[in-house]
């Protein structure tokens, strides 16, 4: 009742102080309405009826969902601007009549009567009921119809229904240019003293019963339907620009994209109003021919730039450049944002079509990410849950995709290029598509362009997903893309973790065609080549990071950092990434890569092109693979071992050395088209590593004392400062004496030492040789010979 009482008092005061009213956004509000608004606000502070809690704090600028949910009566409230087919809004009380009180008396008689007579008692009960007439401003007109009304979150009325005694009448004024004053308001304020509120869509409720709402004014929200000319995205953009005095604009590229509902509840710049639409519909804005142009992100490259045009330079100014005479001209300079600055998860808040426009939340999250940042995007747009989830997924993917920026220098023939243009660059057989962010003029006549990696063309995730308001099957008359087949890589490696000490393969799964969708895959296998006998072995919904070597990695040291050698890799999926890391993190086990039999680590990953990297500052021959440091080839397969998507298949030791058959079946595809692969596991995870520090010392009698140091393959910590743990007991070694590759002698040793007597040397060589070539390996009780070490002593 405090709200009503203060509103009535404020209305009388406002009429006396402001008889002519004031003008607001082209609409005149009467003094009585203003007074009632101010009085209503004061009353709300007393009974806390009209204003409730808003949604959580937004993270981006622009309109908010919470601004559309609570009725108000504030003086100077902005008139909401709405676009689309329908929108749910709170109303602002612009006028309220006096509260009418009705008194009802009822008398009841108790006691008395009967044969004995006696007195009777009467009880008189007096009740009061209240109603009030009021007008609520909705939005800028015109609107086409009123669809539904909610009071305190409960559906009160919808089109075609009766009011069921809740009010004597309901009248919508659409806010057109021919709108006349309300007779209900005139009956209170007097004919000729009421504005028509042309341009403002508002609703008059006549004699609203307050009893059902606890004798107070409820919080109203309304769903209105808009004219067809305001239901397209391009119409909204053109109108917003025109209101800001910008025009004409080019928005034909977005013609036909429907807009379900979008509300701007407060005063803001055109940029703030357009930003939520840009985030939801993924379009770009640029200047073109002196006009503002709106174009979708999904577009093919308009200009192809050949390799010979990249790296243009001013011959006169070459001496001041970063390259000397005769040195190759850099064609592309690339930079990457810090991974920790990018979001790991992105949530979209929106108005849910299926829940009467109530706030909904959909989230996208990266499974593999070093970032811990999470962000939120609040869109006052009417969407389905699938559309909101698609926006979240595409926005997150786009943020990571555009982590990489490039800078190129071009000759003056390309001066027509500007921000927003999509170009395709030829780079040593590869192709990079980029969107221009900034254009600068470098040396006389030269153009310097900053680009962001752009993978939004045909076939991309952005192109395939339906925009908001469009059914899932876009009208393009084409079948949906199939899931990609799966590329299966089986690796018989040393154990990467102590729990992987048994027999088995490491498994790397990735899409055979990265341009297609890949939801994950199932690995099946068995001891017979027929798939009918296969059983399920492993599954993964995360792709491994795989690629191939573009150059040959030369040999290098295995006892310290290799700062001389480098290798160039091309990742199978250009959207995957490799990261440079500090050397201390690499030494602790990060950036572990399998390449052609060698396990190495890299500290520097220099981006050369889309998915192309130059790896340097290497640690070589890791985890007992030093024998593979020499002998690398081009086109070798590479797998990131400490990255996402690497799994393991355990095998029985009885299966070691026997051929088995495997295949990877993409979820959603027929297993019959999956390739069957034959592989034999030798149990590399069980094999002892090659001994180290193989040395010999001759005695005076020409006996050769040979020693070596064993290594641990699992528990490699040096706890006692003397020796590592014995993992394969009993401790046994095999030593071989070699000549021209032939084995002259084979000895079994119970300790890491052996004395090669002069007599034995005479028997093997016919004389005591000046040097002896030896091969030593540790024996496993499970798989036998381990990795061997050869040395000339």
Image: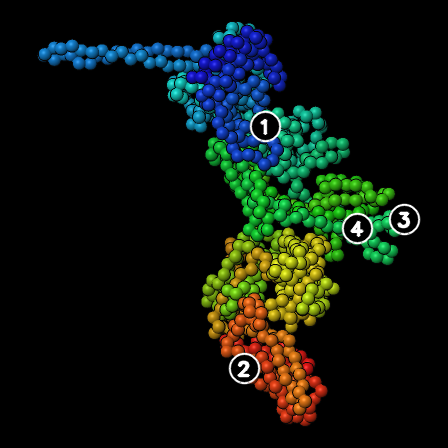
C-alpha distance separating marks 3 and 2: 75 Å
Q: Which residue is mark 4?
A: 310
Vertically, is 257 above or below 719?
above
Q: Secondary structure at mark 1?
A: strand
Q: Which residue is mark 3?
A: 316
Residue 168 in percent (x, y) is at: 42, 15
Indicate the secondary structure of the residue bearing disc 3.
Answer: helix
The quadrant holding residue 626 is bottom right
**Mark 4 Cα-neighbour bin, 10 Å: few <14, some 14–19, many ≥20:** some
Contact between marks 4 and 2 (CB within 8 A): the answer is no
Cα distance, mark 1 to mark 2? 83 Å
Q: Residues within 10 Å of mark 2 (few under 14, many from 20)?
A: few
* Image position of 341 (left or right of 116): right
Q: Residue at x 37, y 11 (%)?
A: 102
Quarter of the image with the C terminus is bottom right
Along the polypeptide, which appears first: circle 3 or circle 2? Answer: 3
Residue 240 locus on image (x, y percent): 65, 27
Mark 4 lies on a secondary structure that is loop
Label 3 and label 1: CA atoms lie apart by 55 Å
522 up-or-down from 790: above or below: above
Residue mark closest to the camera, 3 vs 2: 2
Residue nearest the observer in this picture, 142 or 342: 342
Dots 4, 3 in contact, CB < 8 A? no
Q: In terms of image quadrants, where is residue 627?
A: bottom right
Q: Nearer the viewer, mark 4 or mark 3?
A: 3
Disc number at residue 264? 1
In this rendering, the label closer to the viewer, 1 or 2:
2
Which label is found at residue 343? none
Within-10-Å neighbours for mark 1: few <14, some 14–19, many 20+: many
């Amino acid at each position: 009742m405090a709200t009503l009482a203060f509103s009535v008092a404020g209305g009388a005061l406002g009429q006396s102080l402001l008889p002519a009213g004031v003008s607001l956004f082209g609409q005149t509000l009467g003094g009585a309405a203003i007074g009632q608004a101010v009085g209503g606000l004061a009353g709300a502070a007393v009974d806390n009826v009209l204003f409730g809690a808003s949604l959580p704090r937004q993270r981006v600028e622009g309109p908010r969902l919470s601004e559309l949910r609570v009725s108000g009566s504030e003086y100077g409230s902005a008139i909401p601007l709405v676009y689309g087919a329908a929108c749910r809004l709170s109303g602002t009380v612009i006028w309220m009549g006096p509260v009418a009180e009705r008194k009802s008396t009822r008398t009841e008689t108790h006691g008395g009567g009967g044969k004995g007579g006696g007195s009777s008692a009467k009880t008189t009960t007096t009740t009061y009921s209240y109603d009030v007439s009021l007008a609520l401003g909705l939005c800028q007109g015109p609107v086409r119809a009123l669809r539904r009304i909610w009071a305190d979150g409960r559906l009160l009325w919808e089109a075609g229904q009766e009011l069921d005694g809740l009010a004597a009448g309901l009248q919508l004024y659409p806010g057109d240019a021919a709108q006349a004053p309300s007779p209900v308001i005139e009956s209170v304020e007097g004919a000729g003293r009421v504005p028509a509120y042309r341009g403002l869509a508002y609703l008059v409720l006549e004699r609203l019963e307050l009893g059902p709402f606890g004798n107070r004014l409820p919080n109203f929200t309304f769903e209105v339907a808009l004219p067809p000319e305001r239901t397209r995205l391009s119409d909204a953009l053109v109108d917003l620009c025109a209101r800001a005095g910008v025009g004409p604009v080019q928005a034909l590229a977005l013609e036909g994209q429907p807009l379900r509902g979008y509300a701007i509840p407060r005063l803001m710049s055109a940029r703030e109003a357009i930003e939520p639409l840009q985030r939801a519909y993924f379009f770009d804005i640029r200047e073109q021919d002196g006009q503002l142009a709106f174009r979708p992100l999904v577009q093919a490259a308009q200009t192809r730039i050949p390799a010979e045009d990249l790296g243009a330079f001013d011959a006169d100014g070459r001496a001041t450049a970063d390259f000397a005479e005769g040195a190759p001209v850099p064609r592309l300079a690339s930079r990457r944002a810090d991974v920790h600055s990018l979001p790991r998860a992105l949530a979209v808040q929106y108005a849910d079509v299926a829940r009467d426009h109530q706030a909904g939340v959909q989230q996208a999250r990266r499974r593999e990410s070093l970032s811990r940042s999470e962000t939120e995007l609040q869109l006052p747009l009417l969407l389905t849950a699938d559309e909101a989830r698609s926006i979240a997924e595409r926005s997150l993917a786009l943020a990571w995709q555009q982590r990489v920026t490039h800078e190129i220098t071009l000759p003056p023939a390309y001066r027509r290029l500007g921000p927003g243009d999509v170009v395709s660059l030829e780079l040593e057989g590869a192709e990079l598509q980029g969107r221009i962010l900034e254009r600068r003029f470098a040396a006389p006549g030269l153009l310097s362009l900053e680009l962001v990696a752009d993978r939004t063309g045909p076939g991309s995730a952005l192109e395939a997903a339906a925009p908001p308001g469009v059914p899932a099957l876009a009208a393009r008359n084409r079948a949906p893309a199939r899931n990609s087949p799966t590329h299966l890589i089986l690796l018989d490696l040393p154990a990467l973790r102590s729990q992987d000490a048994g027999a088995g393969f490491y498994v790397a799964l990735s899409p055979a065609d990265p341009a297609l969708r890949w939801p994950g895959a199932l690995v099946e296998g068995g001891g017979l080549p027929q798939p009918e006998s296969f059983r399920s072995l492993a599954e993964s919904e995360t792709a491994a990071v795989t690629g191939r070597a573009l150059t040959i990695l030369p040999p290098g040291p295995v006892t310290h950092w290799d700062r001389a050698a480098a290798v160039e890799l091309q990742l199978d999926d250009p959207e995957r990434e490799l990261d440079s890391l500090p050397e201390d993190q690499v030494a602790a086990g990060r950036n572990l890569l399998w390449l052609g039999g060698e396990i190495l680590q890299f500290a520097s990953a220099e981006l050369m092109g889309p998915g192309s990297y130059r790896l340097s500052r290497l640690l070589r021959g890791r985890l007992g693979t030093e024998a593979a440091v020499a002998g690398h080839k081009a086109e070798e397969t590479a797998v990131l071992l400490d990255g996402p998507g690497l799994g393991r298949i355990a095998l029985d030791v009885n299966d070691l050395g026997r051929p088995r058959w495997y295949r990877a079946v993409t979820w959603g595809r027929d297993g019959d088209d999956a390739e069957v692969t034959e592989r034999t596991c030798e149990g590399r995870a069980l094999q002892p590593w090659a001994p180290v520090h193989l040395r010999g010392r001759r005695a005076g009698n020409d006996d050769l004392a040979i020693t070596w140091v064993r290594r641990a393959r699992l528990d490699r910590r040096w706890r006692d400062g003397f020796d590592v743990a014995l993992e394969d007991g009993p401790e046994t070694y095999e030593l071989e004496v070699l000549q021209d590759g032939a084995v002259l002698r084979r000895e079994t040793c119970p300790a890491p030492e052996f004395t090669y007597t002069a007599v034995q040397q005479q028997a093997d060589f016919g004389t005591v040789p000046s040097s002896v070539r030896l091969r030593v390996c540790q024996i496993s009780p499970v798989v036998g010979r381990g990795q061997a070490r050869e040395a000339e002593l």
